[in-house]
């Protein structure tokens, strides 16, 4: 039989994971990326155990877990430094079956792209969906050298996805969530610190270690859509967070304006009617853009990719049935995660002093009298498992053990 061909539009984390997962199940894959190179924006990504288990399916889970940097204490703080809630990495790992791993997006993109055949990724390609296809005809993507026919197209082109608009032109798409974010990766300018998020009035700061010794810091604040600092974004961060507890001032002193990335947050609380149409499927932000408040955007994209490949594996039903099963699996779950992320964002973006005080007292009380309660907020998310019997990482370990015994 002729090898089926999948065209993936977008080489972000979701697109690359889909390409690797499909390639492992027998598909020929072509990834079309608009950017001139595969150098992801300089930011971190948090991979919870649910995404790690999905990466196990494609043989990357162990490598990702080896990059875990959080050990010991951590938690939630107030701007003055008071701990509202504390937990530790072991407690999270015990509850959800693995560590929380924070790594640079470029590191994960490199791991994924290394699993693809030479020539599978084509950069500088501003591709568009010409025809989503159906049971009787292939899907068609327009690229720089003409039209490409495909047995499957995967739209992994992000929050403002052109593939999504082509599939569902009547859907309103993502809406502004009411706040903007800043992100920076920098060499550690301060001494040891406990990883933390800090919640203020309509503002949030997070400081997390990376395995290579650098720090990933992120911030969020209520702001009008499209607004930017009158001078530069480092100065804006100093105005908003410069008086917060250590290590925040030290990090801000060490960075340059060019280190800081700023992006408004958009999410899709109004779900799509499906995550596919014809021979075309959507993954990641293209299907279900969400606020970053639970750190699940990239995690859900990785889940999408692995579930999609599972349904399209050799010996499965026809493409139409496989994509219908993909939507049935993913649409309810991602809709729930989008809405839970929006609810969490409303909590940390409270601005009224009485409401903020009540929130902080409540968090502190719950942490004191029911220490595991805050971790339980990730039940149903971080404990997800992929629809396969055996993880690739476990299989590879078993094979290595057998070979050594021989």
Image: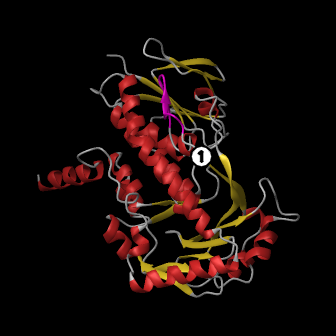
Tell which residue pokes out farthest to the right in this image.
Answer: 230
Tell which residue pokes out farthest to the front in this image.
Answer: 354
Instruction: Please tell me whether residue 63 is drawn above or below residue 253 in the rendered image.
Output: above
Residue pictured at 51% horizontal, 79% vertical: 363
Label 1 neighbourhood size at 10 Å, few (<14), some (14-19), many (20+)?
many
Q: Nearer the viewer, residue 2 or 347?
A: 347
Where in the figure is residue 337, as x and y percent of width and height? 48, 53
Q: Nearer the viewer, residue 158 or 343?
A: 343
Residue pictured at 52% horizontal, 49% vertical: 109
Residue pictured at 43% horizontal, 79% vertical: 87
Where in the figure is residue 146, as x and y percent of width and height? 63, 17
Residue 297 located left or right of residue 379: right
**Residue 377 seen by the camera:** yes
The colour style of the image is secondary structure
Residue 168 location, quadrant: top right
Instruction: Please tell me whether residue 319 is drawn above or below residue 399 in the rendered image.
Output: above
| Bounds of the magenta segment | 272-282
- At numbered mark 1, what does the secondary structure look like: helix, strand or loop? loop
Where in the figure is residue 361, as x and y percent of width and height? 55, 84
Instruction: Please tell me whether residue 24 is drawn above or below residue 52 in the rendered image.
Output: above
Q: Nearer the viewer, residue 77 or 49?
A: 77
**Residue 115 seen by the camera:** no
Q: Is residue 330 magenta?
A: no
Residue beneath disc 1 = 268
Residue 315 location, quadrant: top left
Residue 286 located left or right of residue 306: right
Where in the figure is residue 138, as x and y percent of width and height? 48, 16
Residue 107 located left or right of residue 380: right
Tell which residue pokes out farthest to the top in this image.
Answer: 136
Identify the image quadrant of the N terminus. Answer: top left
């Amino acid at each position: 039989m002729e090898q089926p061909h999948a065209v993936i539009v977008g080489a972000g984390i979701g697109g690359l994971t889909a390409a690797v997962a499909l390639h492992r199940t027998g598909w020929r894959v072509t990834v079309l990326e608009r950017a001139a190179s595969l150098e992801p924006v300089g930011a971190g990504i948090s991979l919870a155990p649910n995404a790690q288990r999905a990466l196990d399916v494609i043989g990357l889970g162990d490598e990702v877990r080896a990059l875990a940097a959080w050990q010991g204490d951590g938690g939630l703080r107030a701007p003055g430094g008071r701990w509202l809630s504390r937990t530790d990495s072991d407690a999270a790992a015990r509850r959800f079956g693995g560590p929380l791993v924070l790594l640079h997006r470029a590191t994960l993109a490199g791991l994924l792209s290394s699993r693809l055949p030479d020539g599978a990724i084509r950069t500088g390609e501003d591709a568009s969906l010409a025809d989503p296809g159906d049971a009787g005809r292939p899907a068609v993507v327009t690229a720089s050298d003409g039209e490409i026919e495909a047995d499957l197209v995967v739209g992994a082109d992000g929050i403002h996805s052109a593939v999504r608009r082509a599939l569902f032109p009547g859907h309103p798409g993502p809406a502004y969530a009411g706040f903007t974010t800043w992100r920076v990766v920098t060499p550690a300018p301060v001494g040891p610190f406990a990883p933390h998020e800090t919640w203020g009035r309509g503002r949030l700061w997070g400081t997390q270690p990376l395995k290579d010794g650098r720090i990933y810091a992120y911030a969020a604040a209520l702001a009008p859509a499209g607004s930017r600092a009158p001078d530069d974004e480092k100065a804006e961060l100093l105005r908003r967070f410069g008086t917060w507890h250590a290590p925040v001032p030290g990090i801000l002193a060490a960075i340059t304006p060019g280190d800081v990335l700023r992006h408004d947050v958009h999410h899709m609380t109004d779900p799509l009617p499906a995550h596919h149409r014809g021979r075309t499927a959507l993954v990641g932000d293209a299907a279900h853009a969400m606020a970053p408040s639970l750190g699940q955007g990239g995690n859900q994209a990785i889940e999408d990719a692995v579930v999609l490949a599972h349904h399209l594996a050799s010996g499965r039903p026809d493409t139409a049935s496989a994509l219908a099963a993909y939507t049935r699996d993913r649409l309810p779950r991602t809709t729930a995660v989008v809405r839970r992320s929006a609810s969490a964002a409303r909590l940390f973006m409270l601005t009224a002093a009485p409401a903020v005080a009540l929130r902080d007292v409540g968090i502190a009380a719950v942490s004191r009298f029911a220490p595991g309660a805050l971790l339980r907020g990730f039940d149903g998310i971080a404990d997800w498992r992929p629809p396969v019997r055996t993880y690739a990482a476990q299989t590879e370990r078993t094979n290595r053990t057998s070979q050594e015994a021989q």
